Amino acid sequence: MTPAEREDLISPLLANGWAMADGRDAISKTYRFANFIDAFGFMTRAAFWAEKWDHHPEWTNIYKTVAVTLTTHDAGGLSARDVKLGEKLDELAGGRLG
């Protein structure tokens, strides 16, 4: 991505609660759900898309909280693939964030 393309693609995610990860070219977001089942359900739905698109997030789950980091290791940082997956995660989460 060119710097201008990158700005255009990532800005909407940043406006929707994503943040640049400290010390690396990645974005991160924490989602909070009503309970563990909702959090795990989100991760299950997300896993289908991640596998379909062959782009897998770095994530952790503690009870009702799911923390996600997106970066494209093959590209050495953020790519359009991260933006696509970030948008899908927001859609699947239905606006839940920390």
Image: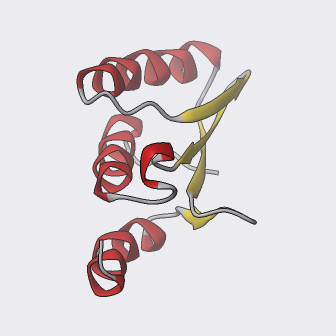
Q: Position of residue 62 (x, y in %)?
A: 75, 25
In the image, taking residue 25 as reference, residue 85 lies left or right, namely left
Which residue is at the front of the view, 44 or 36? Answer: 44
Residue under the point 56% across and 58% down = 26
Residue under the point 38% across and 70% down = 10
Q: Position of residue 21 (x, y in %)?
A: 66, 62
Q: Position of residue 57 (x, y in %)?
A: 50, 35
Residue under the point 44% across and 45% down = 74
Which residue is at the front of the view, 12 or 20? Answer: 20
* Visual colour scheme: secondary structure
Vertical placement of residue 28 versus 12, above or below: above
Tell me the quarter of the picture where residue 33 sits: top right
Vertical placement of residue 36 versus 30, above or below: above
Vertical placement of residue 47 versus 34, above or below: above
In the image, taking residue 35 as reference, residue 12 lies left or right, namely left
In the image, taking residue 58 as reference, residue 60 lies left or right, namely right
Residue under the point 59% across and 54% down = 28
* The N terminus - image quarter: bottom left
In the image, taking residue 47 as reference, residue 58 lies left or right, namely right
Q: How many marks?
A: 0
Q: Position of residue 68 (x, y in %)?
A: 58, 41
Which residue is at the front of the view, 15 or 48? Answer: 48
